[in-house]
Image (spheres, grey):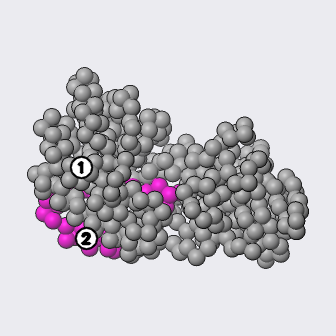
């Protein structure tokens, strides 16, 4: 038997033992959707998460939502109404951000390999481009000249440190992301001299970290780096985007980030910041931490079978919707996401089963030898922490299965 990750707090069942999501029964939500698999996102959890962050962080720090974590339209609109900015990573996300109701001046566009038409769309809209290279800066300035628009340009910095314990290291050493720190001051001066509206720095050291002390250390280093680069460039950055980094507990033994400790440490760093940053604004860019716990993936058991003494629950879902839960999205050792039988939520485990999807590959496992209450054909399996990097980060077209349904409740 292999354990599964911790089910996020706040989920409960009704008197029949049926999982409630946003106060509604999981089986009734599936009926309303008309089919499974289904992603359900709890709007109340989204709202509470933003409130939790704001209560913990210094008031001067803005909150940006990195919509790559979940760009589902109704969810994005809900988030746009609560946060201070949206961070996008493609022309498609830029269009979605504009449709969400967020003013273009509060949208920033990062990511290597931006095509000219994407640069042009961002400049024309008035969004901020986080430049990833000197070459991208050249192209953006040329496009702005042709359009006769003063472009809003920031510099994404490849810092000379990384975020310790992060699941994905985005900075330090050779990286495709951002401009190496030692080359940043000269680029900033060139942007200012060219007449661009220089918007500051975007410094992202890593993501999916659970250690508050490590996050706080990286943020302190980020503020110090921003000050050094500003001094060398001779200009105060209007905004320093500190990146994100805060992760969520997916696996056995994981514990939630102490967000209060992160906020306390950041407040102390900002109170003591160098004079060159005294008029700078600051932002944290979060995706996964804001939306992951609000999402549940519901998939229905279509077969129950035994093979060489093991029991398999075959579902109508799989890695084509939940690549991360299958262990195929950046994890080296496969471990079990939080999982439950929706109709027996909170009941004692009675058997050890392997939950698999409907795809013709042994990689399609949603729960590996996990202890669960008995589930039969027709029962719903719930995969938690499904609000981030689920539907759009998975190969929905694989084997022609098609996308999952989604709903915000």
Looking at the rendered structure, the number of numbered marks drawn on it comes to 2
Name the residue located 51 percent from the left edge and 51 percent from the top edge. 69
Magenta stretch encompasses residue 171: no
Is residue 49 rendered to the left or right of residue 61? right
The quarter of the picture where the N terminus appears is bottom right
| Residue nearest the observer in this picture, 20 or 91 | 91
Disc 2 target residue = 269
Q: Position of residue 312 (x, y in %)?
A: 83, 61
Query: Earlier along the polypeptide chain: callout 1 or callout 2?
Result: 1
List x then y, in percent, for residue 108: 35, 44
Q: What stretch is highlighted in magenta?
A: 264-291
Work out whether residue 409 can be spotted: no
Instruction: Tell me the residue that label 1 is attached to.
Output: 200
Name which residue lies at 78% across and 64% down: 354
Q: Considering the numbered disc 1 on the image, is that residue within a helix, a strand or a loop?
A: strand
Q: How far from the left and from the top, in percent, is residue 220? A: 28, 68
Relative placement, left or right, of 328 versus 258 is: right
Q: Quadrant of residue 349?
A: bottom right
* Residue 351 spot, x, y in % from top left: 83, 73
């Amino acid at each position: 038997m292999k354990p599964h990750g911790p089910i996020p707090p706040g989920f409960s069942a009704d008197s029949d033992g049926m999982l409630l999501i946003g106060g509604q029964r999981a089986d009734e939500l599936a009926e309303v959707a008309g089919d499974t698999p289904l992603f359900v996102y709890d709007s109340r959890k989204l709202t509470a998460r933003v409130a939790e962050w704001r209560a913990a962080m210094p008031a001067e720090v803005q909150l940006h939502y990195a919509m790559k974590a979940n760009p589902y339209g109704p969810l994005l609109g809900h988030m746009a109404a609560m946060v201070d900015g949206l961070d996008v990573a493609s022309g498609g996300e830029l269009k979605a951000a504009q449709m969400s109701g967020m003013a273009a001046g509060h949208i920033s566009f990062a990511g290597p390999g931006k095509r000219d038409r994407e640069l042009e769309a961002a400049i024309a809209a008035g969004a901020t481009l986080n430049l990833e290279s000197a070459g991208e800066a050249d192209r953006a300035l040329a496009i702005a000249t042709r359009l006769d628009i003063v472009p809003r340009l920031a510099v994404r910095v490849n810092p000379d440190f990384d975020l310790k314990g992060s699941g994905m290291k985005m900075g330090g050493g050779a990286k495709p992301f951002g401009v190496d720190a030692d080359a940043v001051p000269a680029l900033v001066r060139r942007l200012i001299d060219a007449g661009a509206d220089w918007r500051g720095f975007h410094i992202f050291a890593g993501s999916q970290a659970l250690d508050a002390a490590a996050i706080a250390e990286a943020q302190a280093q980020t503020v110090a780096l921003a000050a050094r680069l500003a001094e060398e460039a001779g200009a105060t950055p209007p905004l320093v985007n500190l990146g994100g980094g805060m992760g969520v507990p997916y696996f056995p033994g994981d514990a939630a980030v102490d967000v209060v400790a992160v906020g306390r440490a950041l407040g102390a760093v900002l109170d003591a910041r160098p004079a060159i940053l005294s008029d700078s604004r600051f932002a944290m860019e979060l995706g996964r931490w804001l939306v992951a716990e609000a999402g549940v993936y519901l998939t229905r058991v279509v077969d129950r079978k035994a093979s060489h003494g093991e029991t398999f629950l075959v579902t109508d879902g799989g890695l084509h919707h939940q690549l991360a839960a299958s262990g195929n999205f950046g994890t080296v050792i496969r471990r079990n996401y939080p999982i439950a039988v929706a109709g027996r939520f909170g009941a004692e485990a009675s058997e050890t089963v392997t939950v698999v999807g409907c795809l013709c590959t042994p990689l399609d496992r949603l729960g590996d030898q996990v202890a669960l209450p008995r589930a039969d054909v027709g029962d719903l399996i719930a995969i938690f922490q499904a609000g981030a990097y689920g539907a759009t980060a998975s190969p929905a077209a694989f084997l022609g299965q098609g996308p999952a349904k989604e709903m915000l409740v």
